[in-house]
Image: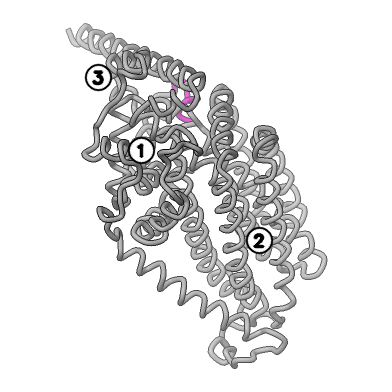
Amino acid sequence: MSDSRSVSSSDDSVSVATAQPNVWRSCRSGNGCNSLALGLAPEASRHWQDLFWLGVFVLHLVGLGLILGVLGINRFRKKDRLNIDKYTMRFLENQAGLTEDFWPLYAVAGGVGTLLGWTWLLLLGSKANQLLKVSVHILTTYLAVISVLCFWGKQFFWGVAFAIGAALQFLYVISIIDRLPFTMLVVQKSMKMVWSLPEVMRVACASMVVMLLWLALWSFGAAGVVASSLGDGGRWWLLAVFCVSLFWTGAVLCNTVHVIVSGMVFLVLMHGGREAGSMPPNPLMKSLRYAVTTSFGSICYGSLFTAAIRTVRWKIRGFRSKIGSNECLLCCVDFLFNLVETLVRFFNKYAYVQIAVHGKNFNHSARDAWELFQSTGVEALVAYDCSGAVLLMGTILGGLISGTCAGVWTKIKYPDRVIMVGSTAMLMGMISVGLAMVVVESAVTSIYICYAEDPLLIHRWDAEFFNQMSETLHQRLQHRSARAREVLTHSSVDGRFQETVSV
């Protein structure tokens, strides 16, 4: 959000942030108070949402599964088993291979990604902060090294792409270096919450098993494409379509876990602890049932857009804060920033918490979450936190490691397929590691929603953490007010100067 839009409510928000927690109970949304009083919205009040996107996703999943199976079987142990090559004769450029030539290479990527995800989950309670710090600082170096290796292998396009990625990552880390202490505090408290919920850990592990099964089928079909007699152009187009599908499928699974975890965290915070007598029976099954039935269409819809928009927003926000006095560049970046911020209103990760709690459709949930943050001033705290970006860095690092392992083996056996196998293997690794990361990210988003809805929930859970969040929010709102006054003063001085010149 721009600073000028936050000025009008900054005084009220600052007083709210410093008030006693029992004064700051609000009912801004139509059913907010009911949800806080009763927990998750009852099943009778929930309806199937975004059914169109649910149908599209299911049809896409079934259709793509059949295509992947056909393409994999066509080259399995026999060239052109299903006699498909007669339809692609004009595209023939390379000698055909077999599916089993490349399938083990993808198995390495899936295995490494799953192993990294499991390792991260096992170290969640004790070493996760250190792992996140390592991923933040080592990602730039890793991207730079891969860029050098691509140039050495005469892959100039990919070398330039990874070099640009390393430069952008370096600039972004510099831009958020002062936010990392608060970010790590939020992540640490979120891990405390997650570690106290063994059911959540079981959900994460089960989701990784489900994803591994889908990756086995996906890599079987992708290996059949790489081994096909199509030319490189045809292979790349097919793999691009498959990668978009894999990204959507992985995002849907991640966000399904997100909704389940958010529902669990909300219940724990609302009832004052996992062992509280007021906790409903089988809360995990209740949250799971909502996520895979009435709310699944909203999850499919939001998964198409949220990840890409969030990534662009983080990058633009980091550059915007470091531009300085270059008015032309600042104007251009502000235009892009406001455009992305508008999209964020409709596609943000906090919508999934509203979906878990209230059972609304995605757009309604996204709008309500954003309005909730604005009305309380918590948006300033959310904008200052960069836990999502830090977790994404860990996910990208895991994908790069998986892609590197598969790429090295491919370089030894099939040097002309390194980029093709390595890039798709990197996506497989990112999705596997992302399933582990989403557990903590879900806890972070739930904490912010609960803090905006009713800070008593956070105060009752961890009073010290509540005080730290309130103090940081107070500082951020003061900072925004000071910047807005500076902008207004600068504008008035320019106006007087122009009047003097005209006279």
The reply to whether discs 2 and 1 touch (Cβ–Cβ < 8 Å) is: no
Start-end of magenta stretch: 319-325
Location of the C terminus (image quadrant): top left
Q: If you read the primary sequence from the N terminus, does the residue marked by circle 2 or circle 1 appear first?
A: 1
For disc 1, the neighbor class at 10 Å (few under 14, some 14 to 19, many from 20) is: some
Which numbered marker is on residue 341?
A: 1
Q: Could you tell me if residue 315 is visible in this image?
A: no
Work out how far the residue at label 1 is from the one at label 3, CA to CA, in angstroms.
19 Å
Magenta-span inclusion, residue 105: no
Query: Mainly helix, strand or loop, the magenta region?
Result: loop
Q: If you read the primary sequence from the N terminus, does the residue marked by circle 3 or circle 2 appear first?
A: 3
In-front residue for pair 202/82: 202
For disc 3, the neighbor class at 10 Å (few under 14, some 14 to 19, many from 20) is: few
Which numbered marker is on residue 462?
A: none
Q: Could you tell me if residue 475 is visible in this image?
A: yes
Left or right: 444 as drawn, with respect to 488: right
In-front residue for pair 176/434: 434
Q: Residue at x 57, y 52 (%)?
A: 204
Disc 3 marks a residue whose amino acid type is Ser
Location of the N terminus (image quadrant): top left
Q: To which quarter of the image does residue 36 belong?
A: top left
- Identify the element where label 2 is drawn: helix
The reply to whether discs 3 and 2 touch (Cβ–Cβ < 8 Å) is: no
